[in-house]
Image (tube, rainbow, N blue to C red):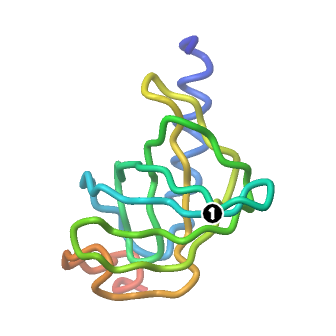
């Protein structure tokens, strides 16, 4: 990826971080993404790069269209949650970074305790 594209990508992600509802935690969690494609159930393995209480940035070998409805299974906890791809995935050296929102919040889904959201405490 060219330098200018990396800088643009970083700025776009920084803007999104400012609007995030809860802080992100960098952690690699194995997940299975299950969705329907051409009337067939598809399951693919992926890994989170970071998670928050409302979703994750997932590294995957293939792309998924923005708006894709899917089921996310945390392979560590065995829990599943419905989700959706929030915007167009970004190519990276290992495939794609896919932003996923969990559409049904599950406090223990990631199996970790999140730090407090300082931005909301200070208001």
Q: Quadrant of residue 30?
A: bottom left
Residue drawn at x 36%, y 83% as measured from the top left: 122
Residue at which label 1 appears: 35
Residue drawn at x 42%, y 59% as measured from the top left: 32
Q: Quadrant of residue 116?
A: bottom left
Between 76 and 22, which is closer to the camera in this rendering? 76
State the quadrant of the C terminus: bottom left
Element on which disc 1 rests = strand
State the quadrant of the N terminus: top right
Between 116 and 86, which is closer to the camera in this rendering? 86
Residue drawn at x 49%, y 50% as measured from the top left: 44
Where is residue 100 drawn, in percent x and y? 55, 62
Where is residue 80 drawn, in percent x and y? 42, 78
**Vertical position of residue 120 compared to residue 88: above or below:** below
Q: From this viewpoint, which residue is outermost toward the top?
A: 2
Tell me if 29 is positioned left or right of 35 in this view. Answer: left
Between 19 and 101, which is closer to the camera in this rendering? 101
Where is residue 26 drawn, in percent x and y? 27, 53
Tell me if 113 is positioned left or right of 104 in this view. Answer: left
Q: Quadrant of residue 117?
A: bottom left
Where is residue 120 drawn, in percent x and y? 41, 83
**Vertical position of residue 61 compared to residue 86: above or below:** above
Count neighbours of disc 1 (C-alpha within 10 A) and say few if under 14, some if 14 to 19, many if 20 or more.
many
Tell me if 83 is positioned left or right of 50 in this view. Answer: right
């Amino acid at each position: 990826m060219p330098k200018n594209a990396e800088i643009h990508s970083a700025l776009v992600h920084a803007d999104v971080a400012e609007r995030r509802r809860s802080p992100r935690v960098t952690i690699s969690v194995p997940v299975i993404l299950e969705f329907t494609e051409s009337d067939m159930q598809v399951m693919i393995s992926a890994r989170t790069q970071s998670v928050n209480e409302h979703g994750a940035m997932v590294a995957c070998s293939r792309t998924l269209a923005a708006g894709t409805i899917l089921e996310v299974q945390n392979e560590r906890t065995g829990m599943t949650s419905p989700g959706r791809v929030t915007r167009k995935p970004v190519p990276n050296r290992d495939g794609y970074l896919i932003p996923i929102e969990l559409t049904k919040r599950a406090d223990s889904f990631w199996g970790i305790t999140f730090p407090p959201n300082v931005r909301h405490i200070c208001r």
